[in-house]
Structures are given as structure tokens and as C-alpha cells.
Image (spheres, grey):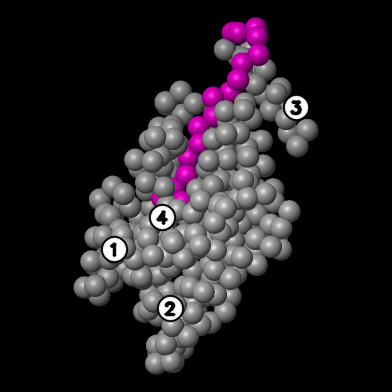
Amino acid sequence: MMRSILCCARHRGRQAESKGKGSYQMMKVAIATDTNSGMTQEKARELGVYLLPMPVIIEDEMYLEGVDITSAQLYEAMHQHHSISSSQPSPGQILEFWDSILQDGYDEIVYIPMSSGLSNSCDNAIRFSQEYEGKVQVADNHRISVTQETSVHSALKLAQQGLCAREIREYLEQRAYDASIYITVDSMEYLKKGGRITPAAATFATVLNLKPVLTIQGDKLDVYTKARGMKQAEAKMIEAVRQDRLTRFGNVPDSQLRVETAGTFESEEQAERWRQLVQAEFPEIPVSYVQLPCSIACHVGINAAGTGIVKKEA
């Protein structure tokens, strides 16, 4: 890290000299992410974060999350059994997004997309960033949803402290695995459509009311365990987070942890019920609820529930 700091300091010095200023000048670093973080356009504006909307395909027509489709509209399309899938931004969309940020007067960008283990969009962004000669740093933070959003908040703090884009990227990547997410689905339909389970396995699970509990810890989405019914699945997720709290994060004070809930519930009552269940297990840590982004909802369907724990990096 010290070598990186010195390199960035020299870069800042050269930047100042190239602008005809003889004194040290801080780089102006923008923080950007995508809607896989669960962040809304409104919240991004409040924080000063640049947000790239992710595409959703419904019946061969593309919609951009938070721009021309909402979660409620996506759920309605699911009720109507439309063909639905997630997609990636085009190279042109990504380059135009970054160019517009630099045109706003920023010297560098830290871009925090979803995990490279869950989508090719991160690897593509890293490749495209090579055209910017270090001005765009893509952090493969191995996260999604609430844990990805935590990384955005940390990046903002680090930028305010004066770190350059490369320092921030390295910091986030070094701490990428200080997080866990657990999620369960109410219906096997979208896991089957996405090819994550076979039609036979989906039928078998539906008949026996089996619910998979999936986990994301780093690169991949894996099966953590199975449960009989949603109530048992929720209990197993809460227990999994509790075990993470006692083991992986056993030496971390509550003030440095976030425990969050998420889901694709259609009513506020359902969302609040799930939040309260998790909050009761972690009374010392404020627990909030966020709607899962459309790109995740495409794969888990309606009434999925998730929870996660993440260490605050800064």
C-alpha cells in the first residue's frame, strides 16, 4: 500500500505541474457503481455517486432499471409469465457513462460493478478501462446488492480522505471477502429458467416444498443448504449470519458491521416482517431492508428473501 501511495502522490504532483500549478493538488475522484448494488438513482444523487442502470430484457425489449422499469413493473411481468432475463450494458453505454463523469470535471473514477464471479460485466469493464490510461479504476470487489453498496460508501469516505483511484480500488479488493450474503427463493421457476437447476430438480423441490438457501461469499453463487418451506429457510439464513457473526467476524465490534435484509416482496408488510425477524437476532446492529435489484430478481423471482453481513471497510 505504501508503494501505491507514493506512486499516486507522484501522479498528483505531475498532474499539478501539467496544469501549471507549482503546489501539490488533490485529485478529484468520482465514485461510480451500477444498480446491482441496490442503490436507486435518488440515493445516488444524494450521495454524489454516479449510477449505471443495468438492462433487463422482457419479451426481447430492453429496459433500464430505475429509468424505464421499476421493481413493481418487473413483478407484474413475472405474474404474466413473460420471458425475462438480465443483461449487460453495451461497451458504448459504459464508455459514454465514464466519459460523462470525466467531463463533469473529475480527474479519476473508481467504478464498482457487481462481482466478476456472477457476471462478465466486471471483466468487460476492466478491459474497457485500459483505454483510459489509469483514469478509470475498476474494483473487482466480489460483491453484489447490500454488500456492494457498502463498498460504495467506503469508497466515498476514502476519496474524501484524499486517496487516489488506484489506492481506493486496491483497498476495496483487499477486503472483498469481508462479507456474506444468503438468499432463498419462493419459486423454482426462475432458477430453472436461468439454468441453475434442472427441470427435474425444480419439479422435485416444488413437490416436496424444498427451498434452497443460496450463499454468495466472493466469486460464486453456491447452495448453502436446503429447507422445508420458507419459514425454515428464513431460520437457516438467520442462523448462518449469526454463525458468521460469531466466527468470521467474532473480533469485529458491532459498530463496524452492517447486517441487512433484502427481498423481492411486493408489499411493505412482507418486507417489514422479514426485517424484524433478522433485527430480533441482532438487537445491537440496526437492520434495514432494501429491494433486490431487478437484475437479481430476474433470477430469483417474486417473494425471495435475503440477508447479509458485511464489515465496514472504512
Local crowd size for mark 4, using a 10 Å CA cut-off: few (<14), some (14–19), many (≥20): some
> Measured along the vertical axis of the image, is residue 118 above or below residue 156?
below
Q: Residue at x 31, y 63 (%)?
A: 269
Magenta-colored span = 20-37
First of labels 4, 2 by sequence position: 2
Closer to the eye: label 3 or 1: 1
Q: Is residue 145 visible?
A: yes
Q: Which residue is mark 3?
A: 6
- Magenta stretch holds residue 312: no
Quadrant assignment, res 88:
bottom left
- Closer to the camera in the image, 121 or 235: 235
- Closer to the camera in the image, 3 or 250: 250
Location of the N terminus by quadrant is top right
User: Looking at the picture, how far across and down is residue 91, in whole percent?
Assistant: 43, 48
**Mark 4–mark 2 distance (CA, rounded to whole Å):** 19 Å
> Measured along the vertical axis of the image, is residue 297 above or below residue 159?
below
Which amino acid is tagged 4?
A: Val
Q: Which residue is mark 2?
A: 230
How many marks are shown on the rendered structure?
4
Quadrant assignment, res 244:
bottom right
Q: Which residue is mark 4?
A: 290
Q: Which residue is mark 1?
A: 267
**Mark 2–mark 1 distance (CA, rounded to whole Å):** 17 Å
**Residue 180, label in figure:** none
Quadrant assignment, res 172:
top right
Dot 3: element = helix
